[in-house]
Amino acid sequence: MKYFSLNHNSVPTDFPTAVRSGLAPDRGLYFPESIPAIPSGVIDTLDQQDPLELCFLAIAPFVGGSIPDETLRKIIAETLDFAFPITPITNNIGSLELFHGPTLAFKDVGARFMARCLGYFNSQKKEKLTVLVATSGDTGGAVADGFLGVDGIDVVILYPKGKVSTIQEKQLTTLGQNVVALEVDGVFDDCQDMVKTAFLDQQIKDVRPLTSANSINIARWLPQMFYYILAVRSLIAQQKKIVFSVPSGNFGNLCAGMMAQQMGFPIHHFVASNNRNKAVVNYLDSGVYEPKPTIQTLSNAMDVGAPSNFIRIQKIMNNDLIKLRKLLTGFSYTDDETKKAIKELFDDHNYMADPHGAVGYLGLKDYLAQEQDDQYGVFLETAHPVKFLDVVEDTLKTTVPVPERIAALMEKEKQSVPIQNYEELKAYLLSSGT
Ligand SMILES: *Cc1c(COP(=O)(O)O)cnc(C)c1O
């Protein structure tokens, strides 16, 4: 399998090169040259298939033989080494809980898969690589944990001082080994700008090859197909049309679901559930795509004004808006509506959701209200409520039980390097590592 740049000014490349570089040389996102099809015999007998083997079947064509099958199977087994339960909420709505991984966020799946792929490539071709990532919250923790101890890879995470939650900060700053947290005197956008500048800085690239670890990277984006595949496999026996509502920010997650569907997995419809950052919802309404400056909300992992994976969604649909509208419905919600949904889920359904899952629930409810009752809807619960402790406790006037793993984390001591500006970041990158 080759990957081409969606900016169309770079030569197509293979999986290892695309993973190591993140973005194409022309700054475009990589996209596979073809979308493989799962054999119909497998699709017809989904509930009898081994879940890990199903995931292997889905991802193997994308890896294109660059990792031996047995190694790839092992990578998948390690990536998915926790539960992905669907908790029933009503008779036609379930919560697909993606927060049972090590950092309690769905990004664990992509981060773990990418880390293991890079670890394998590095064992073949000894070239040290630095993963440089800016985080406003969950990405940094998942990436740090996923890459911890991977040979030949250094991880450098930039986070805005005082702007991430205590749990999130502990997840970034207490690991040690090959993970370093840089505490930036600024906001998330400052961190993001510094990372972008570093990627273009030839002086840094000459001594220290860099890669990104956000959903732009195909090795973080594509394995997100796994939980749609696992969910469809376990729901198929109900013989209802399956709908996924995806709380979306950069749209990597939803876009991976669309890939799974294109490969033949029986998914009837998608709902893009947004907070007030709703460029895609507006596009579905008006046909005009207008990225906007980011608005801060309670579901802050979805505070993205210009979603980077929108262009991949366009590509999957061949830029056909009519086709896209048949497959995807969008809704957007305010913080007040989000809090009401957290309360409704708790009071009426005895379910504690985080703000992102609550937005997903709202989108699903609104979509199903217009549909026949031959559909079963799943909203993706993308983070554990404890990660948004203040909002959830404030809304529900109750305490959120803290998982043991988090309690232990809070005891650990924070270690970070303060950074004021780009020059300091550059000096750090040039003087450390390698
Ligand atoms: C990253 C994140 C999202 C958004 O996912 P995208 O793939 O960027 O659309 C939603 N919820 C949580 C908790 C997240 O961390």
Image (cartoon, rainbow, N blue to C red):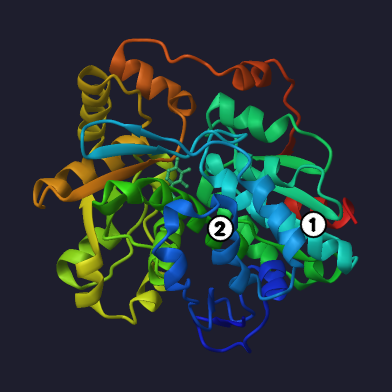
Q: Amino acid at mark 2?
A: Cys
Q: Residues within 10 Å of mark 2 (few under 14, many from 20)?
A: many
Please give the residue where the numbered disc 1 appears in the rendered image: 119
The residue that appears at 41% across and 58% down in the rendered structure is 251
344 shown above or below 333: above
**x and y, in percent, of residue 358 in the image:** 30, 35
SS for tag 2?
helix
Q: Amino acid at mark 1?
A: Gly
SS for tag 1?
helix
Mark 1 or mark 2, earlier in chain = 2
In the depicted view, which residue is nearer to us: 52 or 64? 52
Q: CA distance from mark 1 to mark 2?
A: 20 Å
Please give the residue where the numbered disc 2 appears in the rendered image: 55
Q: Residues within 10 Å of mark 1 (few under 14, many from 20)?
A: some
The image quarter in which residue 14 lies? bottom right
In the depicted view, which residue is nearer to us: 245 or 249? 245
Left or right: residue 261 versus residue 106 is left
**Residue 7 seen by the camera:** yes
- The nearer-to-camera label among 1 and 2 is 2
**x and y, in percent, of residue 429 in the image:** 80, 54
The residue that appears at 54% across and 60% down in the rendered structure is 221
